[in-house]
Amino acid sequence: MITRVEHEYNKAVDKLKISSIKIVDKLTWQYRLNNCKKCKFYQTFMENQNMFKCKKCGCAGYKFMIESVKCPLTKPKWK
């Protein structure tokens, strides 16, 4: 059964995919994700270990997919 968090996350990702916003390639996506996972602000959702949020900026785990977005930390984990 899909949770509300998963539903909202999937909707946000779907909107990104059909928009004109530039999405990073798979290599960049993986690099950003790996760096997010090492961060003290990284928090997974218990229902789905593939979903997370940043406790610093509140991102539900999709901002890092957008090419123009930078990590919000003073010393960014990725650019």
Image (cartoon, rainbow, N blue to C red):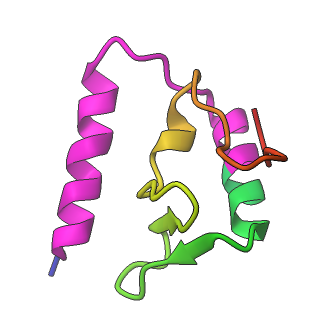
Residue at image position (70%, 67%) is 37
Viewer-proximal residue, 4 or 75?
Answer: 75
Verify whether residue 17 appears in magenta.
yes
- Of the pair 68 and 16, the residue shown nearer to us: 68
At a point 75% along the width and 67% down the height, the residue shown is 39
In the image, taking residue 11 as reference, residue 32 lies left or right, namely: right
Q: Which residue corresponds to the image point at 18% horizontal and 76% vertical from the top-left?
A: 3
Q: Quadrant of the N terminus?
A: bottom left
Q: Quadrant of residue 27?
A: top right
52 sits left or right of 26 in the view: left
Which residue extends farthest front? 74
Q: Tell which of 65 and 73 is nearer to you.
A: 73
The x, y position of residue 5, in whole percent, is 24, 69
Looking at the image, the residue that sits furthest to the top is: 20
Q: Residue at x 65, y 45 (%)?
A: 72
Which contiguous range is marked in magenta? 3-32
